[in-house]
Image (tube, grey):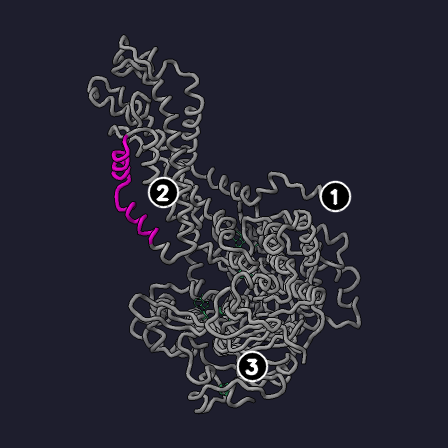
Amino acid sequence: MVEPLMTITNLKKHFALKKNVFSKNVIVKAVDDVNLEIPRESIFAVVGESGSGKTTLGRTLMKLIPPTAGMVSMDGKDILTLDKKAFLPYRRKMQIVFQDPYNSLHPRKLVKTVIGEGLKIHFKGISEMEIRDKIREVLLQVGLREEHMFRYPHEFSGGQRQRIAFARAIVLEPEFIVLDEPTSALDVSVQAMVLKMLQEARAQNALTYLFITHNLSIVDYFANHLAVMYLGRVVETGSKAEIFDHPAHPYTRLLMNSNPIPDPFLKREKQVVRGEIPSPIHPPSGCHFHPRCPFAKAECKEQEPQYREISSGHFIRCHFPV
Amino acid sequence: MDKRGNLLDVRQLRVIFHTYRGLIKALNGVDLWMDKQERLGIVGETGCGKSVTAQAMMRLIEEPGKITEGEVWFENRDLLKLSEDEMTKIRGREISMIFQEPKSSLNPVFKSGFQIKETLLNAKKATPANAEEEVEKILGYVGMDASRVKNMYPHELSGGMAQRVMIAMALATQPKLLIADEPTSALDVTIQAQILELLSDLTQKMGNAVMMITHDMGIVAEFCDRVVVMYAGNAVEVAPTKELFQNPIHPYTQGLLRAVPRVGRPGELKAIPGTVPDLVDPPEGCRFHPRCDYAFDQCKNVLPPLLEISAHHYVSCYLCQKDGCPSAKKAGEEPW
Amino acid sequence: MTVANEKTALGFFEKNKPYIDDLKHTVFLFRKSKLTMVGFVLIVIFLLVAFLGPLFLPYDPIAQNFAVRLQPPSQEHLFGTDQFGRDIFSRVIQGSRMALWIIFLVSAISGLLGTTVGIIAGYFGGLIDDIIMRITDMFLAFPSLVLAMAFAAMMGPNFTNTIIAISLVNWTTYARLARAEAMKVKEQPYIEAIRSVGAGTGRILFLHVLPMCISPVIVQLTLRMGTIILTAAGLGFLGLGVQPPTPEWGAMVSDGRNFLVDQWWISTFPGFAIVFVVLGFNLLGDGIRDMLDPRLRR
Ligand SMILES: Nc1ncnc2c1ncn2[C@@H]1O[C@H](COP(=O)(O)OP(=O)(O)OP(=O)(O)O)[C@@H](O)[C@H]1O
Ligand SMILES: Nc1ncnc2c1ncn2[C@@H]1O[C@H](COP(=O)(O)OP(=O)(O)OP(=O)(O)O)[C@@H](O)[C@H]1O
Ligand code: SF4
Ligand SMILES: [Mg+2]
Ligand SMILES: [Mg+2]
């Protein structure tokens, strides 16, 4: 197997929530013991419902928030323990695009400033002309035009803003980009354009994506690896083909089954599972999914299932995989 | 008058908004109709006027907006001609609405049980004596633990639970029509599936018609009998669901369907070139013409009428009058 | 290439488009409110008088002329004369410039100080924030005039100290405002995005957070200009402000208070001037606040 670009080992991120002055802190285990290997030049999708810790995983990887425990190594180096200065080159190699196109660009800055800022930070002594050249180049690459450089974010539509945010990331020539639900705020036709642009840019620049989403249809179309998260834990991971063909975790199956399919001729038994998503503050004992799981037995309630490999590269966290 | 639907017939509805940017021509003569117990889907991209259509039908358009033209026939009354008092009797009793953000549609200072009770008493569907009992019964219908939920405040409910309470309130009065404006867009997929199943079961049992506003083609395919596709303030195509998916005719509908990713069907996604028009200064004629591959001179002048091109299949596009429908031209290719 | 470059040359209007769009909308709301327009007109008159008035004074506002002591308003002396024979009309006009200076300097000093302290507190939070906020609490615990009096009395009454005293009383308002804004802005995704590109704290604070905090502070500055004038006049009246013979409205009102019954005009006209300007700023300020009410926006 090829050496993975990024290896995540036992990564944890816990938040302490203070309810009020009198109660003691409650802990939210937003990311709990996550182990993943992200192959070079892959599109690695992370799916899960709201609050499952997808964004937190991305932000922790990017070192935008400090981890509680665990290791993230890139090119064989543990990046989370590096100090500010030693980390700076990795800052450039890893970029992130956020979900909300309306708030992720500074409203009072020209597009040129938004994209060019990173260049000024990472390439000391770069001239104004070089900056413009690079910006022009990436603007064309994301399907915008040169003169867009001198406009403000509010003059652009949501899809165009996501392109600008993506241009800001690729102008630094990174290797790895976290895409945090980059299309969930966009209309389908715009989404199709943005996804296409992302695919082309990846091929051109040899990029690796961590693609966060809650839409399984996009995963099928876009990704080649997949991790499913539930309440802070990765419950299943593997290649996309393997998981779509043989989903082993009951939650993965539920997700796939709940995903509405735009085909009125398709007859399928919709299996709707009762119950709400539990609060991440007090997750259920044992397997977090047991209260909603159709296969749960007593063991599931008492014992936390181990993270184990059921076939090559296909990992799962479940006592009774299907 | 000749009605196209026996429950609802909306004709040439026009709505404008006065803003400092100028006049927004939000609805440009919308036509849609529904039969009793039918499930109609309204799809289209952001800003195409789905919500405004629903609001206009309920006469809920407020300053700076105005209904400038149109008729909304509901059974045998034109809702736009009723007095405000008569309209109040229709809202919430004969036509109910649920929204995308259930929590902000509930009053934060009252317990959910109390709010359902008020609705029931208002609509005279319960007496003070049996109201409490009715509330529990209704909460039971929407699959909730009545004794617990009726004493909860809206902020204590999760998004899915709040939407159940909203559904309970909307259906408590046994309306003839339920308008659901993106009822599941803010919910997770597994919860969305629960809510859709609930809506489906309840409305089937009670015999309400449902107008489902959404931008998710998957929900349309799974939930609706018939679909209205909207673009920039017009209904551009109206057809039974299967017919629409199998034989989409308006170039916009075709583009929309090609852009939808779908499990088990990898391959190219095709985007519609261009962007949605600014409704302050919309294109003349067919509002889709600047983005349309087939557009010709006629398209640029006058809005094409919504015509029935085959049984129950209506399209607003000149191609169908010129040299056959666009799908016919691409024989051999899959519709989408 | 050349074509592209021509296009990229930035006009003033393109460069300031967001501001101009905001302004257009503001003007749209502005014209709807009559009272705001009245306030606006009053302030324009005040500014014109302060800038141009002193160039056309009928008399020297300081020179004493005992021959015309305590004259009532007449053709020669529109507002009459005071106990030293000085023309009150000329003094009121000259006083407007003093008032404008005070407003300008106090706003600049307290605005700058308040914004800087505020964004630091808001952005860093924690202990720094706690300390700064407790200090502002202390300032806010006293009525502003009382506090200004205390400072002015401590430092000695003159023009510079008046400015310092009033600024010291005022900066806390702006500090709290800038702090609240900075706390909001630092949570925005675009700040995290800039961090993810590798920007350091100083860069984020001054290049990205600061520009977002300035406009609410400026609005608050206009809202408080009336109060500044009142405080300055209060200090002047109590003899703790600008010293005679420099014409200052508060001090002029005070000058006339022994003659109030028989020579009413000495106190009355500078008093009117104060009312005129304070009213103007308050109407304008209220209008601006209403306009920025998010419910009326967009
Ligand atoms: N800064 C924070 N402080 C406290 N708790 C947090 C913080 N950020 C996230 N959390 C909590 O961590 C959990 C995971 O949140 P996260 O945003 O990672 O979820 P997500 O999977 O990205 O969800 P979504 O699909 O809604 O974006 C949630 O319960 C959230 O409330
Ligand atoms: N209160 C309002 N003031 C001004 N313009 C409005 C108002 N409400 C709606 N509009 C305009 O009317 C048009 C249609 O809006 P509408 O809310 O119906 O869109 P929609 O199809 O429901 O979109 P979405 O999928 O985003 O809900 C939009 O262009 C919008 O800008
Ligand atoms: S461990 Fe048990 S409860 Fe959890 S998913 Fe597997 S079978 Fe279901
Ligand atoms: Mg997230
Ligand atoms: Mg809407």
Earlier residue among tags 2 and 1:
1
Residue at image mark 1: C3
Q: Which labelled disc corresponds to residue A236? A: 3
Which residue is at a point 28% across and 25% down the rendered structure image? Answer: C251
Q: Secondary structure at mark 1?
A: helix
Tell me, yes or no, whether the two marked residues, 2 and 3, touch with CB atoms within 8 Å: no
Q: Which labelled disc corresponds to residue A241? A: none
The residue stretch that appears in magenta: C131-156
* Residue B5 visible in this rendered orientation of the protein: no
- Residue type pointed to by label 2: Trp
* Residue C18 visible in this rendered orientation of the protein: yes
Q: Is residue B44 above or below residue A308?
A: above
Give the crowd class for mark 2: few <14, some 14-19, many >=20 residues within 10 Å: many
**Subunit that carries the residue with mark 2:** C
In front: B18, or B227? B18
Give the crowd class for mark 1: few <14, some 14-19, many >=20 residues within 10 Å: few
Which residue is at a point 28% across and 13% down the rendered structure image? Answer: C85
- Residue type pointed to by label 1: Val
| Camera-nearest label, 2 or 3 | 2
| Camera-nearest label, 2 or 1 | 2
Residue at image mark 2: C171
Q: Is residue C102 above or below residue A139?
A: above
Q: Secondary structure at mark 3?
A: strand
